[in-house]
Image (cartoon, rainbow, N blue to C red):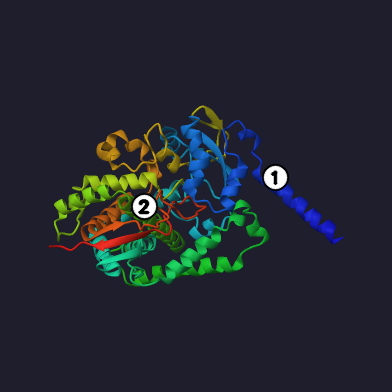
Amino acid sequence: MGFIVVAACLGVCAILLCRLFVVPHDLRHLPRVPVLPLLWSYSRGEPEDKRLRRLVLPFANEMGEEIVLVWALGRWMVHILDHKVGYDVFANIDLFPKEDPPDDLLLWRFIGRNNILLSNGEQWRRHSKVIRNAINQSIPVPQFASLSRRLFSVIGGGQSTQHFDDLAQRFALDAVGTTAFGYDFDAIAHDSPFVRNYNTIMHAIANPLYLIMPFLERVVPRHSLKKRMDILAERFGEILVEKRETPGPDMLTNMLQDVHLTDGELRDNMLLLFIAGHDTSAGGIASLMYFLAKHDELQTQARKEVVDVLGTTDCPTVENVQRMPFLMSCVREALRINTPIAYVVPRSASMPIQLGRYTIPANTSIVLNIYAVHHNERDWPAPFDFDPNRFQNISTVGAAWIPFGLGPRQCPAKAFALHEQMVLTAMMLREYKWSLPASSVHADDVQNAFSPFALCLPHRLDLVCTRIETP
């Protein structure tokens, strides 16, 4: 009897898995990545960039396709590989609204749905106005400079080996905390419980078994993980209450002046700002530091430019940052070659539409694959070479450079993120020289952490930092 029950359960699971991975009939005319290599990639924790480079990018560079069908997070999605096709979709936010993500994946429960990322229509316009006004009230360059000096006190003098992916994460957390929330996590100097709890949650959410079969969240729910997520979300609610009582010159205080946002909407946007300003900013910073470590001649050239502009004592400002075009080219090239977000939240249309030479049925998940666009050989010769000189004439490459997305819904914190990287890197160049250790796992290529959520974040990035003695 027991054998029969087990056999029946296995049979049901087999049927569910077949239905999960089968390509819908109305999508079978599209070029697609085979599902078995994708499942193998997820199950062994292959980093996002390696998976896309191996399985998706050949459709753009070898087959000349503009789109490809990819299975991810429990369903088939159309990935756009060409920025011109991407613009047709992402410029029209009414025809192509953000897709309402499936309930099974805990990531969406953690982030919340009432924020600028997932809302649509009038709700999105309301959120967008409030968030953009708050972010763009002023670029906090002096705060970035102050946090850079705090980071230098941790790195210290002489020569030392630093875990720079960790330092970048701690710097980014303090940057978003002090400027967005008016709350100092003090993560640069101390081990932050916020970081520990957040990293534990994201690691658990990324369990490959639940990613391959999201319905398991209903069959075998992870109650302890949900409780941990709720506790962290509650802490953001407490910060919101504290900010109402003690307003300051920060984004959250600005957002609180808008009476049209509910506390739930404010909290969801806070969580989103925390994740975006924390993980993606840290990934961008670490990638830039890596490429300048690997290319000593470019680091030297960037250092000369910084010293010519800032001298040995001046602090960066919005004005003098604009006088460092080569360093900005390095920032842009690092964001291209190791884009922190490989692809964006899906869109969908309520009617059949045409993408390139293919007809896409209604209600199909459509994503802009930023990594593929940034490594498309039609726009980027030798796409895996780090070459900042590509950006000496930004008008020739601007349309294909999309690390912050495309269209009206591209990331509102673009200027914030670029200035954050510019200020920290300029001050680092003046204070330190850095290189990769002889035994670095990054000696041949940047090695990112496994992320099922389209993030490319350098992992175990050790840098040998040597303090520059000023005469």
Three-letter amino acid code at the position of disc 2: Ser
Residue in view at x 34 percent, y 72 percent:
245
Q: Nearer the viewer, residue 125 or 75?
A: 75
Give the secondary structure at mark 2.
helix
**Displayed quadrant of residue 227:** bottom right
- The crowding category of the residue bearing disc 2, from other C-alpha atoms within 10 Å (few below 14, some 14 to 19, many at least 20), is many
Residue in view at x 24 percent, y 61 percent:
145
Inspect this view and state whether residue 252 appears: no
Q: Nearer the viewer, residue 248 or 337?
A: 337
Residue in view at x 52 percent, y 57 percent:
107
Q: Is residue 6 left or right of residue 151?
A: right
Residue 183 percent across, percent down from the top left: 34, 68
Residue 329 percent across, percent down from the top left: 27, 44
Q: Is residue 44 above or below residue 154?
A: above
- The crowding category of the residue bearing disc 1, from other C-alpha atoms within 10 Å (few below 14, some 14 to 19, many at least 20), is few
Residue in view at x 63 percent, y 59 percent:
217
| Upstream in sequence: badge 2 or badge 1 | 1
- The dot on residue 18 is 1
Q: Is residue 66 above or below residue 238?
A: above
Q: CA distance from mark 2 to mark 1?
A: 39 Å
Residue 304 percent across, percent down from the top left: 18, 51
Q: Is residue 9 above or below residue 58?
A: below
Q: Nearer the viewer, residue 219 or 98?
A: 219
Give the secondary structure at mark 1.
helix
Three-letter amino acid code at the position of disc 1: Cys
Q: Are marks 2 and 1 in contact (CB under 8 Å)?
A: no
Inspect this view and state whether residue 456 appears: yes
Q: Is residue 310 left or right of residue 276?
A: left
Residue linked to disc 2: 287
The label nearer to you, 2 versus 1, is 2
The C terminus - image quarter: bottom left
